Amino acid sequence: MSEFAHATRNRPLVVAANRLPVSRSGDGGWEPSPGGLVRALWPIVQETGGTWVGWTGEIDGPSDMIRLEGIDLHPIPISARERERYYEGFSNDTLWPLYHDAIRDSGYQIDDWTSYVDVNQRFAVRIANIAPPDAVVWLHDYHLQLVPALVREQRSDLRIGWFNHIPWPPVELFQRLPWRSEIIAGLLGSDLLGFQRERAAENFITAAQQLVGATEIDHGVLEHNGRRTRVGRFPISIDVEEFAMAASGRASRQRAAQFRVRLGDPEVILLGVDRLDYTKGIGSRLRAFGHLLDQGRLDPERHVLVQVATPTRERVEMYQEERREIEQIVGEINGRHARLGFPVIHYLYQTLSLDDLIPLYRAGDVMLVTPFRDGMNLVAKEYVAAHVDGDGVLVLSEFTGAADELEGAILVNPHDERALQDAIVQAVEMHRHERRARMEKMRAVVSAANVSEWARSFLGALCEP
Ligand code: ADQ
C-alpha cells in the first residue's frame, strides 16, 4: 500500500480547488500546469487513482471529464459573468482583502454573493455525482467554503476536509461579512478544517462559537447541529528535495554565477519574489530600499535589488493600481540612483521557470519577504531550501505563517518603515558566522517537513476512525 493510500486508509481521493491543475498545451489538448500546490498534490492524486474537480480557467469551458496522466479531471464550467462575480468579485474583492487583515476595503455586493453560492452549488453537485462510495473529499481554499455542507447534504458516506491556504481573520474583522453565518455553516459540513497557523484555527473556533453557536466540546473539536468538526493547524511546506537537488546541480551554480555577473557583480544582491499582490508589501520594501540609498546607508555601487513579480488577477482594479504604484516607485528609485547600464533595482513583471528561479534564489544574498499578511509564504521556504551553500539571510515579516517556523530569519514588522530599513541594513551587514548559523537553523526546520508529509498528515487526520 502506498503511503498516501495508508493515510486515507485506502479510501479513494477527490480533490477540489477553484482551478484544475492544467492548462492548454500547444496542440489544443491539456498539460499539467506548474505551481506549488499542483506539484504537491499531483503525485498523491495519481497514486491514489484519484480525481480532481475544478475550473479550467476558460470561459464557458468544457465540462466533460479529461483523463490526464492517470488522473480524472472534472471541469466546472464558469461563465464570463461568474468569473466577474464569483471569482473576481466575491473571492478576490470581498474575501481576499477581508481575510488579509482588511488591508484594502472589501466590496460586499449581493450579486457577487449569489454567484458564489451558485458556483459552490455546482461544485457540490459534481462532487456528489462523481465521488466513489466512502471517498475522501479534500477541498481547498476560500473559493469553496459552502461546498462542505452542500456535499454533506447529498452524500453522508464521504469524509470531507477543507484546507485554508490563506489566513483566517479575527472575528472582529470576519463579522463584517454580511454572509458570515452562511460561510461558517458551510464549513462546518466538514469533518476536518485545516489552517496554516494556530491563531487562524483559534480565530475560526471563536467565530463559529460566536456567530452560529457552535460549542467546543474538546480542544479543537466543534459541535454544531449534532455534528462534529475537528479544527487544526497543518502548516504547508514545499518539495524540499526538488529545490535542494536542483539548487546543488552544476547548471544551477553556473546560472547563479552568471546572474551575479549580469547584475554588475555587486557585493550584495537583495531579492524579492512575489505574486504582484497588495498583501505582499512589495511597495514598502522598495521604498525602504530607496530611503536607505537616499540616506547613504546602502550604496548603489555595492547593493542591488532584484524584484520579480508574477502577474496575477490582472483584471481586478486593485491589482492594476498596485502594479502602477510599484512600477512608479521602481522608476523613481532608479531615476535617482542608477548609473548608465547599472539599474539599482532590476524589476521583472514575469513568471520565472524553476530553472531560473532556483539559481536566482541561490544568487540572492538577502531575501526580502515582507507581506502585511500571508497564510504561510512558500517563497521564504524555497529560498532556504535552495541555499545549499548554507549562506544567505532571510528578512521575514512577522505576519506570515512562515514566521512561526523560521526562527533564524530576521523578523520584521513591515508596517514599521524604520524597522524595515534597520532589518535590511542588519541583513546586509551581518557577519558570515551569524549568517551561516541562522541559515543552518532554518534549513533544519525546512528539510524536516516536506510537502508530501503535510498532505499525509492532513489526510491521516481526516481519515482517523
Ligand atoms: P501565494 O499567495 O501565491 O499562495 P506563496 O506561498 O508565496 O504565495 O507562493 C507563491 C508561489 O509562486 C511560490 O511557489 C513561488 O515560487 C511562486 N512564484 C512567485 N513569484 C514567482 C515568479 N515571479 N516566478 C515564478 N514563480 C513565482 C497562497 C497563500 C500563501 C501560502 C500558499 C500555499 O497566499 O500564504 O503559502 O498559498 O498554501
Image: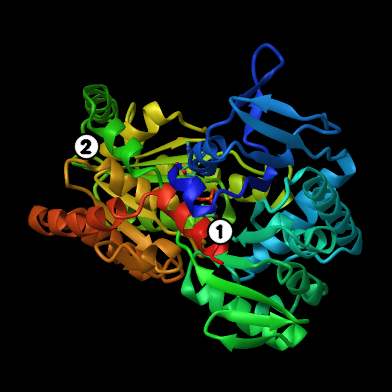
Quadrant in which residue 139 is drawn: bottom right
* Mark 1 residue element: helix
* Callout in the foreground (1, 2): 1
Determine whether the beta carbon of the residue marked 1 sits less than 8 angstroms from the nearest atom of ligand 1: yes
How much space separates mark 1 and mark 2, taking CA atoms? 29 Å
* Mark 2 residue element: loop
The first of marks 1 and 2 along the sequence is 2
Q: Amino acid at mark 2?
A: Pro
Which of 379 and 155 lies nearest the eye of the viewer?
Answer: 155
Q: Counting other residues with Cα less than 10 Å from the Cα at mark 2, is it few (<14), some (14-19), or many (20 or more)? A: some
Residue name at image x 67 percent, y 51 percent: 135
- Residue 107 x, y percent position in the rendering: 79, 64
Which of 406 and 264 lies nearest the eye of the viewer?
Answer: 406
- Residue 275 x, y percent position in the rendering: 53, 45
8 horizontally vs 347: left or right: right
Label drawn at residue 279: 1
Residue name at image x 37 percent, y 68 percent: 404
Label drawn at residue 266: 2
Which of 171 and 154 lies nearest the eye of the viewer?
Answer: 154
Quadrant for the C terminus in the image: bottom right
314 horizontally vs 375: left or right: right
